[in-house]
Image (cartoon, grey):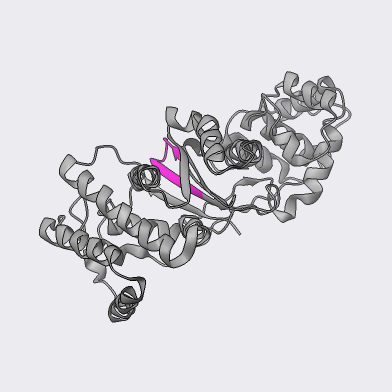
Amino acid sequence: MRNVADLPLHGGHVPAWLARRMRKLTRLVLILAVEEYGTRGLLERLSDPVWFQAFNNVIGMDWDSSGSTTVTAGMIKDALWEEELGVKAAGGKGKKSRATPEELKKIAELYELDPEPYVRTSRLVAKVDTVALQTGYQLYHHVFFLDEKGNWAVIQQGMNGRERLARRFHWFDAETFTLDPHKAISGLKREFALNTVSKEAEEYQKTLLDVIQENPVKIERELEGLKAMAKGYMPLVYYRPREPGEKEVLRRYESLGKFELNKKALEFARELGVNNYEEFLLVKGLGPSTLRALSLVLELVYDVHPSWKDPVTHPPDPFKFSYAVGGKDRVPFPIDRPAYDGLISFLEELVSRHPEERALVRNVTRITKNWKFPEGEKRAT
């Protein structure tokens, strides 16, 4: 199962008066969530895109924008460092994402954990969502959550500048990183995606590991023949088209970007004797272009195919949670400051009370469980 959400790219910023309230409400929700579900339960919910989006809506962020990921994840990270709940977060947007390894080492030291597995996991999940799964999105946001027991979750987001969309990827305690590794899926389904981490791609992965043991020069020669075919030249003698659909396959690869081999990366993988797909993805210099090139060669020369299915399904819409305090961009209505302050006061009082008294609040949720919002009020921001 995988977990992905597509959102329109939005600029702008959160006004100071709203940011202060968001920070307070975020802290209170996290305290209650950890007390109710434990740190592992919190991580499970953060790795659920519907829950995460509902959290975003409750604190008043845009219900449908890319900023909902960067702002909400940033608020959560800050709150977890300010409050000791047994779970911390590393990374963030842009330059902050590159600080993830060092921050993970600090968290691991705090919780007396070996940092290396988590640093490796951070690198690997980023490589999967930029290289192994290609849907036209470039990662620019990566937040890694780690609790005192060693459970982890990752929320990262990629940008498609041409289509003005962002896609969010969620991970949780993955047992494998190369066969359907994400937790679940939500978002806009694309016509196709180069998906080399689908269970359907097991044969592809095995064949690729065999092919990279060959001299990179030979692989490059095969690639150049395919490029010539794409330009309309006659195939080389050793290559014979098998079916008319091969030109469509070439166009599909070209739509994802250039395919150029990094021969140094392939030589390095060969020297290391890489024998599993995880190790291969972590090879320095292996990028989307090189994997596209290898996939093209495998598909048209060796007749071994990756999966072309975009691993996305459509979740329930959490828009109704925007009615808690309103939305930053006035959808479904402007932020109701008195209601926001009243909610914060109520939750502060709730946090200070005995856990048994909080059980009464759960009954209140039944009132709105089946409530449905007026569709006409759901407007793009």
User: Does residue 307 appear to the left or right of 354 in the view shown?
Assistant: right
Displayed quadrant of residue 74: top left
Q: Where 52 sits versus 226, above or below?
A: below
Q: Which residues are magenta?
A: 159-169
Location of residue 196 in the rendering, given as x and y in whole percent from the top left corner: 69, 45
Q: Where 100 sits versus 63, above or below?
A: above
Q: Where 258 sits versus 187, above or below?
A: above
Location of residue 210 in the rendering, given as x and y in whole percent from the top left corner: 86, 36
Location of residue 362 in the rendering, given as x and y in whole percent from the top left corner: 34, 76
Residue 223 visible in the shown view: yes
User: Does residue 218 appear to the left or right of 224 in the view shown?
Assistant: right
Residue 381 visible in the shown view: no
Outermost residue, left direction?
338
| Residue at x 54%, y 36% (from the top left corner) | 104
Majority secondary structure of magenta residues: strand
Outermost residue, front direction?
354
| Residue at x 61%, y 40% (from the top left corner) | 118
User: Does residue 329 appear to the left or right of 200 in the view shown?
Assistant: left
* Front residue of 134 and 130: 130
| 285 falls in the magenta region | no
Location of residue 336 in the rendering, given as x and y in whole percent from the top left corner: 13, 58
| Residue at x 27%, y 48% (from the top left corner) | 23
* Front residue of 315 and 222: 315
| Residue at x 67%, y 47% (from the top left corner) | 177
* Front residue of 260 and 80: 80
Total marks placed:
0
Q: Quadrant of the N terminus?
A: bottom right
| 161 falls in the magenta region | yes
